[in-house]
Amino acid sequence: METQKQTAKDKIDSLLGSGTTDKVQGQVKSAVGGAKATVGKWLGDDSLSVAGHREKAEGDVQHATGEVKSLIEKVKDKAEDAADTLREKAEDVREKAGVIFDNARAKATELAEEAKAKLAGTKDELRDASDEAKRKFEEARSKH
């Protein structure tokens, strides 16, 4: 019986939000306890009045417990949403970093190719200048 009661409570809480059954049961218990305390006072029955006050306090505590469960669920949901947002942003950053890296690698390759071409051109110019210097040296030597 207790398991069925708990299962029903869990189903209601999953449909209407965590703590709903505690809030409702607490409100009912608090109202019944308040009524018992009032009737006990009217009748001059101190034990009924005390029992009513105790039941009302228990109901208030149960209602507060439901409120806390509800708040915890809301905080948990917000934390999960924040974590999802952070994961999405991290993925965006990772993708952008990949694009930046690919662009940098392409630019570095392009600059390396330009440097190789300039080096090859400089080698050719040096060879030509060296050949010209040798030719002029030989020319000058043969005049003397």
Image (cartoon, rainbow, N blue to C red):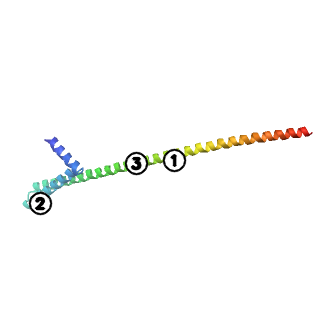
Question: Residue 76 at x, y = what percent?
Answer: 32, 49
Amino acid type of disc 1?
Ile
Query: Which disc, if any, is residue 88?
Result: 3
Question: Residue 97 at x, y = what percent?
Answer: 49, 46
Please identify the quadrant where the N terminus is shown: top left
Please identify the quadrant where the C terminus is shown: top right
Where does label 1 land, which residue? 100
Residue nearest the observer in this picture, 142 or 30: 142
- Image position of 43 with respect to 96: above or below: below
Q: Is residue 141 left or right of residue 77?
A: right
Q: Residues within 10 Å of mark 2 (few under 14, many from 20)?
A: some
Whether tag 2 and tag 3 are in contact, CB under 8 A, the answer is no
Earlier in the chain: of badge 2 and badge 3, it is 2
Where does label 2 land, which residue? 38
Closest to the camera, between mark 1 and mark 2, is 1
Earlier in the chain: of badge 3 and badge 1, it is 3
